[in-house]
Image (cartoon, rainbow, N blue to C red):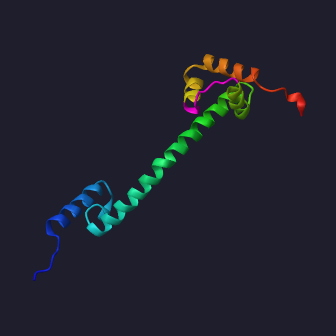
């Protein structure tokens, strides 16, 4: 009995891996064993970084808001707390966009946040 080598299916699998390795440098582009390792690694990185991207963007928005708040004489944490007390439900992405593209509207939000701060004399 002949040895089964999965000829057509195995060829399709190799073609798929090499297709996914297009754009890689050196032998990782056209040598199957190296390409397979590189593709697996790239998929691991892509999976991890899809989640990381969300973290990175939130950190960017918070950094922008911190700078915008400090320019207006309030800390970021007090600003967010004031918005919560004022029952304003805008996420950090939208607040960041408002701070950049509509500074007057952001000034109004800062004013509302300052107005809804608790008295600091209790400390």
Locate the C terminus by quadrant. top right
Left or right of 110 on screen, residue 92: left
Q: Position of residue 93 (x, y in %)?
A: 55, 32
Residue 92 is inside the magenta segment: yes
Left or right of 13 on screen, residue 39: right
Residue nearer the viewer, 82 or 87: 87
- Residue that lies at the very extreme toward the left in this rendered image: 1
Span of residues in magenta: 86-93
Quadrant assignment, res 96: top right
Left or right of 59 on screen, residue 116: right
Q: Which residue occupies 23% across, 62% down?
A: 13
Judged by its main secondary structure, the magenta piece is loop
Q: Which residue occupies 80% across, 27% down?
A: 118
Q: Which residue occupies 89% across, 28% down?
A: 121
Quadrant assignment, res 26: bottom left
Locate the N terminus by quadrant. bottom left
Position of 38 relative to 121 (above/below): below
Residue 26 is inside the magenta segment: no
Q: Which residue occupies 71% across, 34% down?
A: 77
Q: Position of residue 84 (x, y in %)?
A: 68, 28
How many numbered discs sit on the rendered protein? 0
Position of 1 relative to 93 (above/below): below
- Residue that lies at the very extreme toward the bottom in this rendered image: 1
Left or right of 69 on screen, residue 25: left
Residue nearer the viewer, 28 or 69: 69
């Amino acid at each position: 009995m002949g040895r089964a080598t999965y000829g057509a299916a195995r060829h399709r699998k190799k073609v798929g891996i090499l297709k996914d390795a297009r754009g890689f440098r050196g032998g990782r582009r056209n040598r199957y064993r190296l390409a397979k390792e590189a593709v697996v690694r790239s998929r691991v990185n892509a999976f991890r970084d899809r989640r990381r991207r969300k973290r990175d963007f939130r950190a960017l928005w918070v950094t922008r808001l911190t700078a915008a708040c400090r320019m207006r004489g309030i800390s970021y944490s007090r600003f967010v707390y004031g918005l919560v007390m004022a029952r304003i439900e805008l996420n950090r992405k939208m607040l960041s966009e408002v701070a950049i593209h509509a500074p007057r509207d952001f000034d109004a939000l800062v004013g509302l946040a300052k107005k809804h701060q608790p008295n600091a004399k209790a400390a």
